[in-house]
Amino acid sequence: MSTPTKTSSIKTVNPFNNEVVKEFEAMSADQVSAIIDKADEAFKTWKNTSFEARAKVMHQVAKIMRERKEELGKLATLEMGKLIAESIYEVELSADIFDYYADKAAELLADHPLEVQHGEAFLSYEPIGVILSVQPWNFPYYQITRSAAAHVMAGNTMVLKHASNVPQCAQIMEDIFKEAGLPDGVYTNLFVAGKDIEPLVANTKIKGVTLTGSKPAGASIAAAAGAQVKKSTLELGGSDPFIVLEDVDLQQAVEVAVAGRMWNAGQVCVSPKRVLVPASKYEAFLSKTKDAFAQLKVGNPLDADTNVAPLSSEKAAVDVVAQVQKAAEQGAHVILGGKRVDRAGAFVEPTLITDITPDMDAYYEEIFGPVFQLYRYNTIDEAIEIANATEFGLGGTVFGKDTQKAVEVARKIDTGMVYINHVTGIAPELPFGGTKESGYGREQSPAGIYEFVNAKLIRTTTPDANY
Ligand code: NAP
């Protein structure tokens, strides 16, 4: 499986220096088919395994992850470049999600009684079979976890297609599941390139598909699933607004917005990509943002004092710089940064852009890198209009001292999540997901576990009943 090939796109390339570390051969169609057969076979036993037994395995996965967090963290940093502290935090977060579903699944999926006039009716939540999970590289463990923890705890089995640039993170999670005692076939990693995934959806043994990633990948998978009348969930991109209200503590808002935007070198679906500031506060906010940028240190993601990591790949860095250049050509002002950092690796300068207008692409699209877009607004209605101007609808932030006022604004933002006085966050017990072109379905929280179960109605009644 780890034989180097010249053609494989599945490989570890360290974004810190762009050196190829390890290559993996893509699996053949026959190998993939055999894995799906095995997952289908495993489902027959796993669906009847008690919640208690399933939970034991999931708690063990969490325990192993915590015990090996340094090693797992280093591997994520090696493969996609994120800061080591962020990698370790991600491992701990993933362990918490495994524990959450291990603790909650039995309660959440217990029979749900319905009120009826006679006899009895209840919903029986039943797993549906093999789920294909397609995941991106930006949170190599967390992305796997939020679907696997919920759907495997619910009694489904899973085949994972991870991003081609994080193959070792993908494989190590399969290994951890095995070490934790998960039966063979319940969760298996596939080494397949993204372009070869769509045909797998038609395999009759795949019963559902969940994808986190870009709109084109999501649209293609969802279309393939729709053609086979299979359930899909999509967690796609975002261009989250961060609305600063008049009564704000400016320094605090700047610090939260800048740190949020530089998190994972800006490669977070819920990063505060567009920061909206009232005209009366604009110049002061801009000045403080420049000060905050001066504190940023781009560098080795393994160094504790680095706070801006390289991007995940050379291509990602090239694409982000091209987007910034296009914005500049269309009339936006690049106040700081905008270029590659003069060193080896997939680095892009922390970038500050202003004066973005509706006739520019940057007004609507997602920039997946350390690019802070600052907007000025005159009225709160104008702020809401700018916030809702993109086709994305993932997360968002409203920042201000009057929480009630902030909540009123939050209600008018067309996204799946809005945080007050915090960038869009992540917690096992809170739902994560979007609306509009950011996708559909929810992960984490109670909601996440119902996505791939059949909520079957069982009704006890009598032959002479009216219905
Ligand atoms: P991407 O290209 O769509 O890749 C994501 C996954 O889809 C990878 O495993 C990729 O495999 C696979 N893939 C690519 N093309 C495919 C196709 N035609 N059919 C099926 N699978 C395909 O996404 P990305 O650009 O690397 O990731 C960043 C995007 O993900 C951003 O837009 C970000 O906002 C979004 N994201 C969303 C969330 C959320 O929860 N809403 C979370 C994180 C990221 P290969 O690597 O082999 O190409």
Image: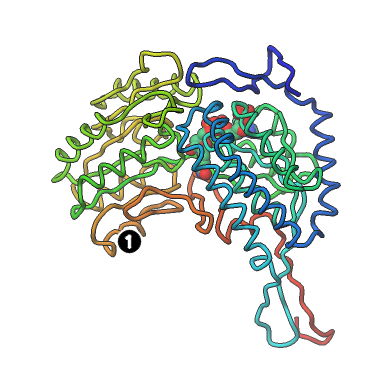
- Amino acid tagged 1: Val
Instruction: List x then y, in percent, for residue 34.
Output: 84, 35
Which of 313 and 230 lies nearest the eye of the viewer? 313
Q: Is residue 214 above or below residue 102?
A: above
Instruction: List x then y, in percent, for residue 426.
Output: 47, 50
Q: Quadrant of residue 172?
A: top right
Judge whether residue 109 can be spotted in this image.
Answer: yes
Q: What residue appears at the point 70 percent right and 42 percent down from the top-left corner? A: 132
Label 1's element?
helix
Coloring basis for residues: rainbow
Q: Is residue 214 above or below residue 385?
A: above
Instruction: List x then y, in percent, for residue 196.
Output: 70, 28
Which of 460 and 368 lies nearest the eye of the viewer? 368
Q: What residue appears at the point 34 percent right and 23 percent down from the top-left corner? A: 349
Q: Specify the quarter for ligand 1.
A: top right
Placement of the C terminus among the 4 image quadrants: bottom right
Q: What residue appears at the point 49 percent right and 16 percent down from the top-left corner? A: 17
Residue placed farthest to the front in the image? 67
Residue tagged 1: 407
Instruction: List x then y, in percent, for residue 123.
Output: 71, 70
In this rendering, position of residue 176 left or right of residue 17: right
Placement of the N terminus among the 4 image quadrants: top right
Which of 350 and 17 lies nearest the eye of the viewer? 17
Q: Quadrant of residue 335?
A: top left
